[in-house]
Amino acid sequence: MRDVSIIGLGQTVVGEHWDKSLRMLGYEALNSAMASARIERIDALYVGNMLSGELTKQEHLGALIADFSGQRGIEAMKIEAACGSAGAAFRVGYAMVAGGMQDVVAVMGVEKMTDQESSLTTSALAMAADAEYEALQGLSFVGINALLMRRYMHEHGYKKDDFAQFAINAHANAVNNPNAMFRSLITARQFADAKPIADPINLLDSSPIADGAACVILAPTAMAREFTDKPVRVRASAVATDTVAVHDRRDPLYLEGGAISAQKAYAQAGIGPWDLDLFEVHDAFTIMSALSLEAAGFAPRGKGVRLALDGEIGIGGRLPITTMGGLKARGHPVGATGMYQIVEVTQQLRGEAGANQVRDARLGMAQNIGGSGATVVTTILERA
Amino acid sequence: MRDVSIIGLGQTVVGEHWDKSLRMLGYEALNSAMASARIERIDALYVGNMLSGELTKQEHLGALIADFSGQRGIEAMKIEAACGSAGAAFRVGYAMVAGGMQDVVAVMGVEKMTDQESSLTTSALAMAADAEYEALQGLSFVGINALLMRRYMHEHGYKKDDFAQFAINAHANAVNNPNAMFRSLITARQFADAKPIADPINLLDSSPIADGAACVILAPTAMAREFTDKPVRVRASAVATDTVAVHDRRDPLYLEGGAISAQKAYAQAGIGPWDLDLFEVHDAFTIMSALSLEAAGFAPRGKGVRLALDGEIGIGGRLPITTMGGLKARGHPVGATGMYQIVEVTQQLRGEAGANQVRDARLGMAQNIGGSGATVVTTILERA
């Protein structure tokens, strides 16, 4: 297997792009990634996306975006794993280069969610859950997370306000990210007063729906310096799954897929969790940050929230997370989110994170979660 | 890169499965493929599917079917390339094993189309076309193919009835396929009298919407004999693309994606088209058979129909096609079709095609087409 590196990256601002079509967002991210790798041609394109069919009546994004971006003819396809789609697409692109099937490939995440009424978007997002056993009962995606959060508070003795630091930290970091959707600080008081969405989840526990596209270019590490002075090595890429319906799990508060995925990734990279300099968690809701930190081995069961309460998660902390704003404040275009995470880890490892730069960042991890933990993709990157 | 073989295969009957859910169809195909390889555990599952979101409000099929089939925890994801979804999924599964990322994987195609009103299915299928420049103008998917067929007849001087042999041959072969949807002979007179769908396409030019799932198990060839006495080697797997909108092509009657895909596959296998003993074409409409035969190098431009007229395409002919009934008569569950094609080539190479057995079949090819040629996946298999 060949060692693989990221040689280019691109992203659009995350937000409400009512003036841009899905293919245009994809083109902008791909074009910018190719420019950063100084290339005009790629061998293949793997597109992570969840909702293009439901929300824009367009499937077949691989061929569509390849052609619209001037790459007619190349291998292209879409990969879907709910909110973990872009992470899964990265896994495919990585495998294609590592295995020698392709040399220079683009992996993209793209999603366009804000052109529709929010009721339609809410029902579309429920397709990440179990259509027959969850959605059909009227349970929305935020509803499932609210049940998890309530149970976690009950089991482990937390108050609602104990989750505030996840959101406060994400917003603080988004202030310095020009591509973030919400570049504004929030306070503990604002968190406490925020409008309820599905109790105990309120507006500031929740990541916003958004439009956006992000992209990286991959190549064999042996070729990487032809394209960039700052290659970033892929040290691990691992996918694991769990039941889609939360009620089928042995323990609904344990992300078994997250744990398997992280352990596989640590084994591939030959490291342990505390060797990492930063961790982009999938903070779709604050409860997901806590569960993800625990599954990835940073805290025992029920102690994920403590990392936030103890001030460990800021840029200068023991484990910086959501360093560019996370899903919460950078925004959560669901099928694109996993690629934003990977792009942001890459920015950190290239020393291009500006005011949010984690000092001497050498190893970074992103964990992209589909549904309520049914698909978990873990990616570990290293400064070359 | 490791040599890869198919070590097991499974399929459901193609038809209207109103009594079975999507996940149940997927389970049945996977379970049967695993039984044929005598295994109880797989390392990963790649699911080809196009319409689960639109028609059953369920995405996230990778995790869903893995869990429902007793494979909780494994790597799993969905791959989409319109009607070429299952072929593209096969390409991913093949790459994962060839590159050494996984050892024993399942690749599945699954689709459930018949639970909905046909108007919804028609608009869902239009997502394979260009939503903004084709579907939005009111052009359905069969409408696009009707324009292609009309133009082909005009350019090359064919009459409508000249296409009949593609349908007659497919139906004749389906009679002997227990998994086919339409196990009935049709005559040239019935073809001539069939109800128009989108002139010049009539009911017997068109493949039917259907439910179904098909699956193969892949493993390194070096391990294949541990699982089966009849491994079938994967000699080539290639994906190429073209514009999604047909009006953007240099020549709408030339499947450039089909040609690139076939040429890549021939190069990988080190063969030419006439080395093949059979060819599963993507006969969604009779015109697509003609264009596909030309793009794959079996006939010059405008001469694809001649192969049918000259009686070359039957089981005993120079180039047997749609040997188990094709999309036309086996049925066309769109995101599953590419896997039915691969399963059927495998049956031929294992000598398990019953009354439709192609004598001494050693090399077989399947070409799975997404949209009107925007994604083309070519797979070449060889009897071990």
Image: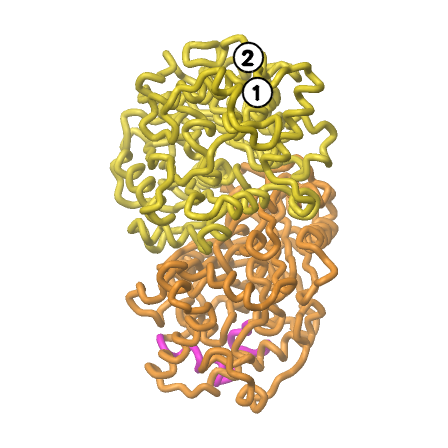
Chain colours: A orange, B yellow
Q: Where on the picture, by quarter, is residue B81?
A: top right
Q: Which chain carries label 2?
A: B
Up-down relation of residue B59 to residue A16 (above or below): above
Q: Residue, x 33% and y 41% (percent of image)?
A: B30
Q: Distance between the residues labelled 1 and 2?
A: 9 Å
Q: Give the range drawn in magenta.
A: A301-321
| Dominant secondary structure (helix, strand or loop) of the stretch shown in magenta | loop
Up-down relation of residue B310 to residue A84 (above or below): above
Asked if residue A361 can be seen in this view, the reply is yes
Q: Residue, x 65% and y 16% (percent of image)?
A: B302
Q: Are marks 1 and 2 on the same chain?
A: yes
Q: Does the magenta stretch include residue B17?
A: no
Q: Where is residue B317 in the image (x, y as percent from the top left)?
A: 46, 10
Q: Mark 1 lies on which chain?
A: B
The three-letter amino acid code for the residue at tag 1 is Leu
Q: Where is residue B382 in the image (x, y as percent from the top left)?
A: 42, 22
Q: Mark 1 points at which residue?
A: B293
Q: Mark 2 points at which residue?
A: B307
Q: Does the magenta stretch include residue A315?
A: yes
- Residue reaching furthest bottom? A189
Quarter of the image that includes the C terminus of chain A: bottom right
Residue contact between numbered discs 1 and 2, judged by CB atoms under 8 Å: yes
Asked if residue A86 can be seen in this view, the reply is no
